[in-house]
């Protein structure tokens, strides 16, 4: 399954549980909070100042 920027964090973690480590390595430490689970990967990346394209490439390679 290819991970897309409009997926929520919850959808990402359900599809690829190992992605949690990648997100944590990029400073996204609030994976367990309710807001993080409702926002998209793109929204989370923007809030944390991350390039969404680079982040998705890393997640999809894992």
Image (cartoon, grey):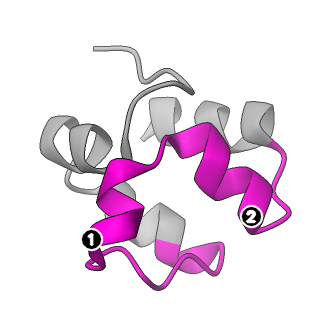
Q: Look at mark 1 in the image and give the residue it sits on.
A: 34
Image quarter in which the C terminus is found: top left
x%, y% of residue 23? 51, 65
Residue 16 sits inside the magenta stretch: no
Q: Residue at x 75, y 69 (%)?
A: 48
x%, y% of residue 35? 38, 67
Q: Residue at x 51, y 24 (%)?
A: 6
Q: Nearer the viewer, residue 30 or 13?
A: 30
Q: Nearer the viewer, residue 42 or 17?
A: 42
Image quarter in which the N terminus is found: top left
Find numbered disc 1 in the image and state the secondary structure of the residue it sits on: helix
Q: Residue at x 31, y 41 (%)?
A: 12
x%, y% of residue 60? 48, 30
Asked if residue 29 is positioned above or below residue 15 in the image, the reply reads below
Measured Cα–Cα span from mark 2 to mark 1: 16 Å
Query: Magenta region: which residues?
Result: 24-51
Asked if residue 1 is positioned above or below residue 43 in the image, the reply reads above
Asked if residue 60 is positioned above or below residue 33 in the image, the reply reads above
Q: Look at mark 2 in the image and give the residue it sits on.
A: 47
């Amino acid at each position: 399954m290819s991970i897309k920027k409009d997926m929520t964090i919850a959808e990402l973690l359900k599809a690829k549980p190992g992605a949690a480590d990648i997100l944590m390595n990029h400073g996204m430490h609030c994976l367990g909070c309710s807001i993080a689970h409702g926002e998209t990967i793109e929204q989370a990346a923007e809030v944390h100042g991350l390039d969404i394209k680079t982040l998705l490439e890393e997640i999809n390679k894992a």
